[in-house]
Amino acid sequence: MSMFYLPEKEEPLRKVIEAFPFPETLVGAVRYGCGHINDTFCVLCQPKEGDCVRFILQGLSQTAFPRQDEVMENFERVTDYLREQIAAQGGDPARETLTLLPTKDGRRYYTDETGKVWRLMPFIEGTDCFQSATQERFAAAASAFGRFQFLLRDFPAHLLHEPIKRFHDTENRFEKLLAAIEADKAGRAASVRAEIDFALARKEDCSAALNAQRAGVLPLRVTHNDTKLNNVLIDRETGRGLCVIDLDTVMPGLVINDFGDSIRFGANHAAEDEKDLSRVNFDIVLYEIYARSFIAGTQGGLTQAELEYLPWGARLMTFECGIRFLTDYLDGDVYFHTAYPDHNLDRCRTQFKLVRDMEEQFDKMGEIVHTIQKELQAGGNEK
Ligand code: ADP
Ligand code: GN1
Ligand code: MG
């Protein structure tokens, strides 16, 4: 590893890299991607013959995932299952789902001296990962996440751990916000009164989906739970949503949340941390495009109640994410990666702006789902 390039601040990674049997000459490793949770690196190797090969080396966040063994057990079970399903559908499992590459001593991942898990995966080449939507990209992501739901429809949910308890329990997220306001660990509460008031005024909303779940109206399914546009790799050649990644939160959940989290992140033209809120606007055209491809991608897998609640999924995931950013801001930025002191606050503000927009257009959001449903039924009857 003498000529190997590693930025000085990443020196601890050297030991991790040594745990894996990389082919031939290691060229370098650099931080990669825009995830807010894990430590992701791209490792470059030069084999004796042919082009350089890239790998993704990822260390799991110990803050987000206290039970790292459970995350990895889920990861393996889900990807093993997906590999079979993809092959059965005539797809290419090596490109359409993630694969773990073993350590030198034959383990499926490496655990460092702090207990942090590191996993190595082939870099899925010929794909792009986008931070903002166009109509084409958004439709591609929607089909991929809809298909993901379809492929996992019969996955035995009891085999899955719940790596983050109450992950999309919006009522509990609200309680955590109240606790963070009360504790005011970073001394920031007084400066974000407007954001706190915005959240407090929406306490009742937090129960909209949970009440329906408790009443047996919305079923639990195996869901992804983190369906941002940058958690799907899009095939550069075909433009298709090829591979759903970031599988650490796959667990039983509500399908409306998978729909909603995608809308939260993608159905607008500004970044999640845009400072100029006049640029942050919920785009109902993108919403419609996503809804059409997502519903089609599930291949008739959604119940009538799930379809009815899709708009709530969007509104709730956006609100919940806003209160999570606000909570982390009040806690002193301990959960999400941040690049500057007010980063979580800027993110919270974009989410709350989008919530306001969605509230204004809520009826229209429901009508759009109805229209799509009719279209798909008519299309189905024609066949
Ligand atoms: P986080 O939980 O921090 O968001 P992700 O698993 O989403 O971590 O990975 C971060 C980024 O790394 C992704 O957005 C994507 O750009 C890239 N990435 C992850 N796995 C792969 C892969 N197998 N091939 C290509 N790119 C990948
Ligand atoms: C995190 O890991 P990443 O960046 O794909 C977070 C999501 C949030 C999202 C906000 C495990 O997703 O829940 O919605 O940031 N993931 C976890 O951008 O907390
Ligand atoms: Mg991610």
Image: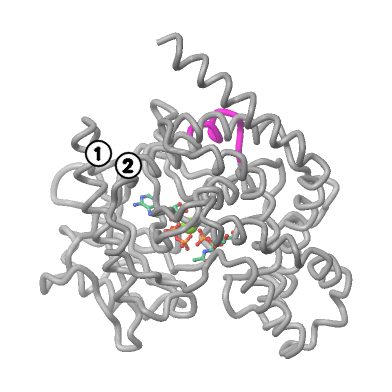
Work out which residue is located at the far left of the displayed protein and give it.
105
Above or below 297: residue 383: above
> x%, y% of residue 366?
69, 36
Residue occupying image coordinates x 23% and y 36%: 92
Residue at 19 percent across and 68 percent down: it is 108
Q: Is residue 361 visible?
A: yes
Horizontal and vertical percent position of residue 133? 60, 38
User: Quadrant location of residue 103?
Assistant: bottom left
Asked whether, in this view, residue 286 is left or right of residue 3, the answer is: right
Q: Residue 38 appears in which quarter of the rendering?
A: bottom left
Specify the principal SS of the magenta part: helix
Instruction: Judge by depth and name the residue closer to the eye, 44 or 243.
Output: 243
Task: Identify the element where label 2 is drawn.
Answer: helix
Element under disc 1: helix
Give x and y (percent) for residue 346. 75, 63
Magenta-highlighted residues: 133-140
Q: Which mark is residue 86?
A: 1
Question: Quadrant location of the N terminus?
Answer: bottom left
Give the CA distance from mark 2 to mark 1. Answer: 8 Å
- 91, above or below 75, in the image: above
Identified at 32% across, 50% down, the residue is 123
174, above or below 53, in the image: below
Residue 324 at x, y percent in the picture: 65, 69
- 2 vs 1, front mark: 2
- State if disc 1 and disc 2 touch (CB < 8 Å): yes
Quarter holding the C terminus is top left
Q: Which mark is residue 132?
A: none
Label drawn at residue 151: 2
